[in-house]
Amino acid sequence: MFSTTRQLNLIQRANIRSLSAVAAKTLKIGLIPGDGIGREVIPAGRRILEALPESDGLKFEFVELDAGYDYFKKHGVALPERTVEVLKNECQGALFGAVSSPSTKVAGYSSPIVALRKKLGLYANVRPVRSVQATDKSVDMVIVRENTEDLYVKEERTYTAEDGTKVAEAIKRISETASAKIGKIALEIALQRQATRELNPSKSLHSSPILTIIHKSNVLSASDGLFRETCRKVYEDNQSIYSSVELNEQIVDSMVYRMFREPECFDVVVAPNLYGDILSDGAAALVGSLGVVPSANVGDDFIIGEPCHGSAPDIEGRGISNPIATIRSTALMLEFMGYTQAASRIYDAVDANLVEGKFLTPDLGGKASTNEVVEDIIRRF
């Protein structure tokens, strides 16, 4: 995990875990299906973990936990305290499915995944986007999104102006502390990716690490300006560690344009919460579907794997949900926990499934069921 005191040893620690599994390690994983197709794809993640070969040195225990809008409608709370307590006290990691958050205000309801990020200190949302299929644009980047503040602090108010019309306001909070933490983890990920690509250069578009800071400080000079300055300061004050990383920056609207025109230019991207949310969903279009893009909510002491897609009520119950985002999120969870051998096995099996193209769900132009995709990936272990 990316604890503050361990970040510099991540690669070495991961290599040790990959190569030495004298006794099988038992990990307890929380499973939070949530709403909609979350109830279909999270079991796929569990099956993947259960199918890993003994040579990876891992065993798993699972605990089913509640959260979501459906749970809220039945019990009046979207994130029960038991879920938080079990994750904190019993689990080493978790998988979160999806939530059906309403687009209009519902009294008493707030997003359970946003609440989980705050309660567990999951300050980074990490979303790798990589092209595999021949139809994809050339993409190999990771979007690192600050997870705890910006407009997502949800401090809003509505009032009536003097002319009788309504006005709504929201607080955009950017702190030096949170910006420094996200800047540091983004730089560490850039170094980690470089170490990995040096082992197999043919798997990456990039030959050296690049970090791009996203902001709108030409307009929001105080808030986005602080984010930009703080990320740069982390880099400039630690040149003995990060000198091999090329540091760039991009105004967010220009970033959207360039990301779709020339995505191959970007390696690691770090952004405030809102920009990171928008960019990472948009980047999924470069590789065909939100159904293939994973994410991990990362803190100093805990990791939650979370597919980027929503609850997709239009296909719920039809058995055609794409499980790949969840399966890759499962691998990403293991990767950040340091179990890179098992993670690599999952990544390679998923890539092989996509390249062959025999078992693809309808969102990717295929006719396969969720179960058929899972079985095809497992047989490649």
Image (cartoon, grey):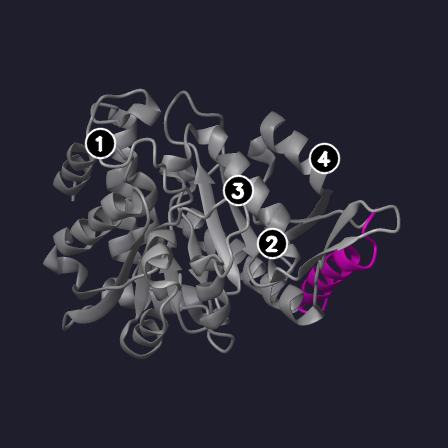
Secondary element at image label 4: helix
Secondary element at image label 2: helix
* Classed neighbour count for the residue bearing mark 3: other residues with Cα under 10 Å, few (<14), some (14–19), many (≥20): many
Secondary element at image label 1: loop
Indicate whether 6 appears above or below 371.
Answer: below
Q: In the image, 267: left or right of 306?
A: right
Which portion, as a residue range, is magenta?
218-239
Asked if the residues shown at circle 4 and circle 1 are in contact, with their CB atoms under 8 angstroms apart, the answer is no
Per the rendering, the mark at residue 152 is none
Residue 219 forms part of the magenta stretch: yes
Q: Nearer the viewer, mark 1 or mark 3?
A: 1
Asked if the residues shown at circle 2 and circle 1 are in contact, with their CB atoms under 8 angstroms apart, the answer is no
Real-space Cα separation, disc 4 to disc 2, in angstroms: 17 Å
Residue on which disc 4 sits: 254
Per the rendering, the mark at residue 318 is 1
Real-space Cα separation, disc 4 to disc 3, in angstroms: 15 Å
- What is the three-letter code of the residue carrying label 3? Ser
Q: Residue, x 60% and y 54% (percent of image)?
A: 273
Residue on which disc 3 sits: 280
Per the rendering, the mark at residue 273 is 2
Q: In the image, 266: left or right of 68?
A: right
Real-space Cα separation, disc 4 to disc 1, in angstroms: 39 Å
Q: Quadrant of the C terminus?
A: top left
> Disc 1 or 3, which lies upstream in sequence?
3
When asked about the image quadrant of residue 88, the answer is: bottom left
> Disc 2 or 1, which lies upstream in sequence?
2
* Classed neighbour count for the residue bearing mark 2: other residues with Cα under 10 Å, few (<14), some (14–19), many (≥20): many
> Disc 3 or 2, which lies upstream in sequence?
2
